[in-house]
Image (cartoon, rainbow, N blue to C red):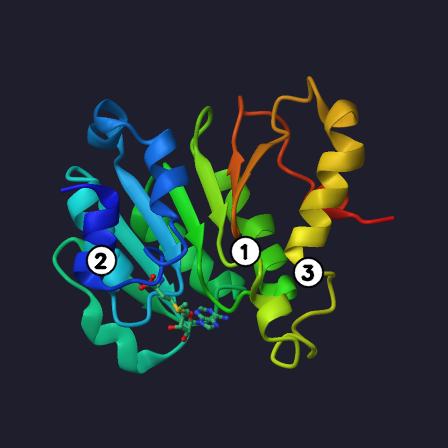
Amino acid sequence: MTLLDLMHKYQTDKAEHRFDIPYGFFFDEERRGQVRSVLELGTKKGASLRVWEEYFPNASIFGVEMKSKYAVYASDRSRIFIGSQSDPEVLELLVAAAGSSFDLIIDDGSHMSDDQVASLTYLWRYLKPPYGIYAIEDLHAHVRFPEAYSNERCRYPPMSDMLLRHIEGRIAAEAGQGGAPGICVYGAVALLLKGEEGPPLDCDRFLKTS
Ligand SMILES: C[S@@+](CC[C@H](N)C(=O)[O-])C[C@H]1O[C@@H](n2cnc3c(N)ncnc32)[C@H](O)[C@@H]1O
């Protein structure tokens, strides 16, 4: 079964966005077998957890979800931590339970810039070097639903703007710094590619827009 088939099978909207294409590009069959640890922020009814369970047969899957009613979608392969993706206490518990760095982290949570920045700031150091991937999904959310994304959790500019600025101005400056991520943008998902372990990502500087 292809990744797109799995996304349809479990009915995650990742199929509609064709996020199978960028994930499939980076995770060929050999690499999929080597993946040990995957984290998704925002799990809802567990559709994508079921996809990752099948797609990464040797991985433990971890999720963070704000709403406690979705805790029932945990399984013997997937643990769900209830709380906010921006809460360091929740993330600390999760990282301790995972016990090792993640091969893949997916942010499909609130899509609000402050939460995205808080998660990236905390979790980047727990992504495996080299080749770990940190995906930020639904970069178009603030355009589709402008009212939902103009609140106090969106003090940072939209993630798409911050990444664009980074691509425009900072890549040359960051080159050779070891920990600076490469960025692949496919439709409404950005995949940040971790290089060698360098200094911890200075997220504020990385994302700074001025
Ligand atoms: C788009 S849905 C996730 C869908 C799921 N990843 C899938 O593909 O099947 C977003 C989820 O993020 C949760 N969420 C919203 N804000 C959050 C936050 N601050 N921390 C963690 N989860 C959050 C919502 O409750 C919702 O269940």
Q: Residue 150, located in which quarter of the rendered image?
A: bottom right
What residue does disc 1 label?
A: 119
Q: Residue at x 41, y 39 (%)?
A: 22
Q: Which mark is residue 27?
A: none
Query: In the depicted view, which residue is nearer to us: 153 or 15?
Result: 15
Classify mark 1 as within 8 Å of ligand 1 or not, answering yes or no: no
User: Could you tell me residue 208's position as x and y percent?
Assistant: 78, 48
User: Could you tell me residue 160's position as x and y percent?
Assistant: 65, 52
Q: Earlier in the sequence, mark 1 or mark 2?
A: 2
In the rendered structure, the answer to whether residue 124 lies left or right of residue 147 reads left
Cα separation, mark 1 vs mark 2, equals: 28 Å
Q: Farthest residue in the top direction?
A: 176
What residue does disc 3 label?
A: 158
Q: Residue at x 32, y 31 (%)?
A: 27
Q: Which mark is residue 8?
A: 2
Q: Residue at x 81, y 49 (%)?
A: 209
- Of the 4 image quadrants, the one containing the N terminus is top left
Q: Earlier in the sequence, mark 1 or mark 3?
A: 1
Amino acid type indicated by mark 1: Ser
* Mark 2 residue crowding within 10 angstroms, few (<14) / some (14–19) / many (20+): some
Circles 1 and 3: CB atoms closer than 8 Å: no
Q: From the viewer's perspective, is residue 134 above or below residue 8?
A: above
**Image quarter where ligand 1 lies:** bottom left
Q: Residue at x 72, y 50 (%)?
A: 162
User: Could you tell me residue 158's position as x and y percent?
Assistant: 68, 60
Q: Residue 149, located in which quarter of the rendered image?
A: bottom right
Q: Tag 3's secondary structure?
A: loop
Query: In the depicted view, which residue is nearer to us: 66 or 24?
Result: 24
Q: Tag 2's secondary structure?
A: helix
Q: Is residue 127 visible?
A: no
Which dot, 3 or 2, sits closer to the camera? Answer: 2
Q: From the viewer's perspective, is residue 171 above or below residue 78?
A: above
